[in-house]
Amino acid sequence: MTKRWKVKPSAEKEIAERLAKAINVNPVAANLLIHRGITTFEEAKLFFRPQLEHLHDPFLMKDMDKAIVRIEEAISKGEKILVYGDYDVDGTTSVALVYSFLKTIYPNLDYYIPDRYKEGYGISIAGIDFAAANDFKLIIALDCGIKAMDKIAYANGKKIDFIICDHHLPGETIPNAVAVLDPKRRDCTYPYKELSGCGIGFKLIQAFSQKKNIPVESLEEYLDLVAISIAADIVPITGENRILAYHGLKRLNSSPREGIRAMLELSNIKKELTITDIVFVIGPRINAAGRMESGKKAVELLISSSAAHALESGNYLNKNNSDRRDLDIYTTQQALQMINESPTLQLRKTTVLFDPNWHKGVIGIVASRLTETYYRPTVMLTQSNGIVSGSARSVKDFDLYEALSACSDLLEQFGGHKFAAGLTLKPENVEAFSKKFEEVVSSTITDEMLIPEIEIDAAIDFSEITPAFYNILKQFAPFGPGNMNPIFLTENVSDKGYANIVGSNHLKMDLIHKGSKTESQAVKFPAIAFGMGEHYEFVAKKNPFHVCYHINEQQWEGKTYYQLNVKDINKPA
């Protein structure tokens, strides 16, 4: 697929030079910082050395005081507390975090994860009935509940109080709960709006600890869970999330909890973990429990204190993940075939596919794959218990949530954010929804939005890739939305003559470049271009071309070297 390259403009020379001098970095690194909104020594210090003491006061969040008072009341009265969360990574890590913390100070509690297939997303009537039948007086709902007006009303009728901890966009009305913690509330002035669901759970235990004069450092053991949720839920790694992810990753790498240790052992991961490892190794395994059977199994793993029990739970999740992967591949093949056989679908600016037999647990993953393949807003729909449910994914710069809002007359429910959402509708509305979604998207999306964009941070010469430069670059991590791993552009490179295809259509090269900015000798770096075998013939002839890439550090037989992870190749005009 053709991609458009967009090179970020260089910062004002005077500002870049001043910052470079203040923190002793080269102009390229200074530009990378300025692109991230960092222009002073103090801002750079906080960016490179995130400190827990710079977390915001949790009581700045609306209703936090009410939430803590209600938890204290429940503890003083000996009431049963139920920690309730969604079945995905963010929900299960949230439950593991709040449950583990409260368990250290109060024994009278349990946790609940709804069944994806019987109860669906979020707070359920069945969950409230379970609480009522077992005499729970307080439910702490995590990563869900911000739109559950009717469910909260139902719980109020049963004399069950709710504290809602959510990070999704609220509707016009806020549920009538004891406390509703959500920085995205219009009436909430909390300084940082992009916390994960688990992040909100962390702010809750931070507030409780603060009131009891427990230092924030004692909460570090829970930050691994917050880092996992930040990575898996794809929230921006900026501001407060950067502090939480930075310290959470340190925790994961220095002293992982038994469940994570077991998961890494079963996955044969022995290197230092990054956000990418969480996204591709840890996240899918935690998610697989809720996708294939029960999200409770994921919580069991995450709260396990016994190595033997953690290994048993880890094996169970591994099998779930293997089954999920098989199902995911099969469903993706079916979906691609539906598109390939339909000229109508191929001409549309959206993809909406429906098969009542698809497994509900994998349609979100498949929607993401289709979006990567065809690069257009995508909805995958399946059916169970007489209702159609779906997962939707978007492309860069297009607001999926707004598009679904415009189709709300045909939907029973929908929720999510700009790039990903879930929805339910009646079977008889599927065709009308497909048509209207196409009309709405076609009228608002631009042709440019339908071409994937590679945002390039800087054009550099190979001679500028030095150990000193890479050491600075490493400190930009953890990478993720809002702080992506920098992509560099180098023009007029060529292969030294050893290009070959490896694995599944991957292009391996030794790239050589004679600098345009300096009079240096030609510099060579090994490079890998995943899935780009179609460029082999052109590259193998030593033709010059332009390349954009990440810089990675690799180790082989005790030696460390740099490798370019190629994102795209362009032939000169």
Image: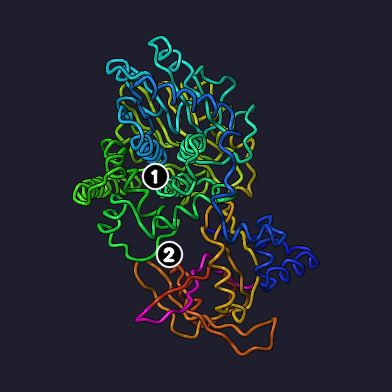
Question: Mark 2 is on which residue type?
Answer: Gly
**Residue 349 seen in the figure:** no
Residue at mark 2: 531
Q: Nearer the viewer, mark 1 or mark 2?
A: 1
Helix, strand or loop at mark 2: loop
Q: Earlier in the sequence, mark 1 or mark 2?
A: 1
Residue 563: say if magenta. Answer: yes
Residue 234 vs residue 37, the one in the foreground: 37
> Which label number is shown at residue 270?
none
Q: Which residues are magenta?
A: 556-573
User: What is the spatial separation of the Cα atoms under label 1 and label 2, in whole angstroms?
Assistant: 19 Å
| 419 to 426, vertically: above or below | below
Residue 228 position in % (x across, y down): 42, 48
Residue at mark 1: 365
Residue 423 position in % (x across, y down): 45, 29
Question: What kind of secondary structure does the magenta stretch mostly adopt?
Answer: strand
The furthest residue to the top: 157
Residue 80 position in % (x across, y down): 33, 22
